Image (cartoon, rainbow, N blue to C red):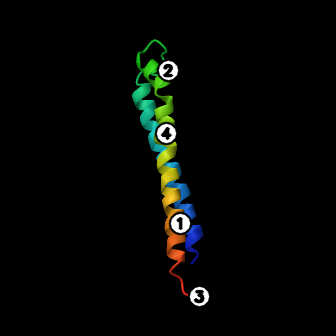
Amino acid sequence: MNWRMGLLRLWIVATGIWFMIVVGWAWLVAYPYGLDPLYPAFDWARDTLRDLAGLLFMPPVAVLIVGVVLAWALRGFRAR
């Protein structure tokens, strides 16, 4: 069993699901009445695009970094 490849694939799938959840949530909150530019939420969505990008990308990147660091640390305990 190849743990490295399996965990990488699991991370890719979880990241895709996370992206779909965040984008779906943002769509429902920002555009409850469609793409009507006169609706006040349109301004809110434009103003918080940076926050949404952070919410979208930071958790998967953090999980990847923690996984790589844990793999590196556990590799140090391997018998030579």
Which residue is under mark 4?
54
Q: Kindly identify the amino acid type of the residue bearing the numbered disc 3.
A: Arg
Q: Which mark is residue 35?
A: 2
Mark 4 and mark 1: Cα distance apart in space: 23 Å
Tell me the residue that label 3 is attached to. Answer: 80
On screen, residue 76 above or below 47: below
Residue 4 coordinates in the image, percent (x, y)? 58, 70
Between tags 1 and 2, which lies in front? 1
Q: Nearer the viewer, mark 4 or mark 1?
A: 4
The mark nearer the N terminus, 4 or 2, is 2
Which of disc 4 and disc 3 is earlier in sequence?
Answer: 4
Disc nearer the start of the sequence (2/3): 2
Q: Which residue is located at x 52 percent, y 61 percent?
A: 10
Q: CA distance from mark 1 to mark 2?
A: 39 Å
- CA distance for labels 4 and 2: 23 Å
- Farthest bottom residue? 80
- Residues tagged 1 and 3 counted as in contact (Cβ below 8 A): no
Secondary structure under the numbered disc 1 in the rendered image: helix
Q: Earlier in the sequence, mark 1 or mark 2?
A: 1
Please state the horizontal and vertical placement of residue 6, each as a whole percent of the image. 55, 68
Is there a contact, CB below 8 Å, between mark 3 and mark 4? no
Residues at marks 1 and 3, CA–CA distance in whole angstroms: 24 Å
Question: Callout 4: helix, strand or loop?
Answer: helix
Q: Tell me if mark 1 has few (under 14), some (14-19) or many (20+) residues whose alpha carbon lies within 10 angstroms of its own.
A: few
Percent across and percent down for residue 21 are: 45, 43
| Residue nearer the viewer, 53 or 26 | 53
Q: Which residue is mark 1?
A: 7
